[in-house]
Image (cartoon, helix red, strand yellow):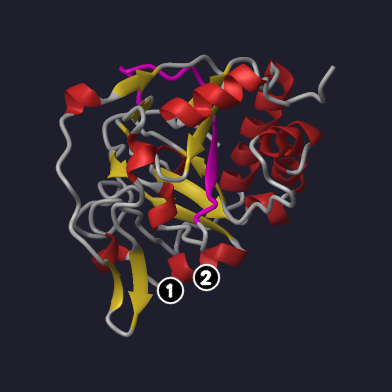
Amino acid sequence: MGSVGSLTPEQVQLFNSQGYLVLESFSCPEEIDGLRKRMDELLDGFDCSTASIFSSKNQKQLTDNYFYESAEKISFFFEEKAFDDDGNLKQSKQLSINKVGHALHELDPVFKKFSSSAKISSLLSSLGYKRPVVIQSMYIFKQPGIGGEVVPHQDNSFLYTEPRSCTGLWLALEDATIVNGCLWALPGSHKNGLVRRFIRDEEGVHFDHPSPSYDHKDFVALEVKAGSLVVIHGDLIHQRSVDLKSY
């Protein structure tokens, strides 16, 4: 019998074929509850006087030093529509946050326990990793009414290595449906390679190529129950529509 979290040969083959894999009941209700409660505590203790906005559509304009420094911190990013014309939050910070990242897996004991668990390690070993390293983590909110969509993209565009080696793990902390903001994937698109890179240079941050256009009817909705884990190939074209919490 394989280790907890290990993939079967059939699952590995499916992942290699379609570029993603859904693992139901990866996390138990107690683990999910623990992650959600811990994030509630972090939000309660967050002083929102320092505001940073996250946008997947306009990163060049809205990316700032707070975002750069978040690689080694637990930072809080608001939705674009969270503030009024005077710069005040329209509603509570709990209903205004877009995401928290990007070093939860290093600095918070609850999220570190999940990220470094044996089942995560076994899963990645099944995919051929010898010494997997978690390089960023995010707790993503999909806020009712103001939650922004995440446009079609590839994770390798942002987390680029040579050779390309990124695999995304997306844990649903609530049931994810087409109504409240589930993932959408373009099956097999990982086989076409990397479309573009997100670069930081003397001109700031920008993509090296414009985004291709995609037909939404070609995407598949990944509706999952809370506790399900979606494994995402770094070159897979995927997007997220708008209202959900995930890690």
The percent coordinates of residue 89 (x first, y second) are 33, 50
Neighbour tally class for label 1: few under 14, some 14-19, many 20 plus, Cα within 10 Å: few
* Residue 173 can be seen in this image: no
Residue that numbered label 2 is attached to: 69
Q: Are marks 2 and 1 in contact (CB under 8 Å)?
A: yes
The percent coordinates of residue 228 (x first, y second) are 57, 20
Residue 107: image quadrant is bottom right
Give yes or no for residue 167 being in the magenta stretch. yes
* Residue 108 can be seen in this image: yes
* Viewer-side residue, 34 vs 168: 168
Residue drawn at x 61%, y 65% is 72
* Viewer-side residue, 110 vs 214: 214
Q: Amino acid at mark 2?
A: Glu
* Image: 78 above or below 206: above
The percent coordinates of residue 120 (x first, y second) are 71, 36
Q: How many marks?
A: 2
Which range is magenta?
164-181
Residue drawn at x 42%, y 26% is 18
Residue drawn at x 68%, y 45% is 129
Residue drawn at x 52%, y 41% is 168
| Cα–Cα span, label 2 and label 1 | 6 Å
Residue that numbered label 1 is attached to: 65
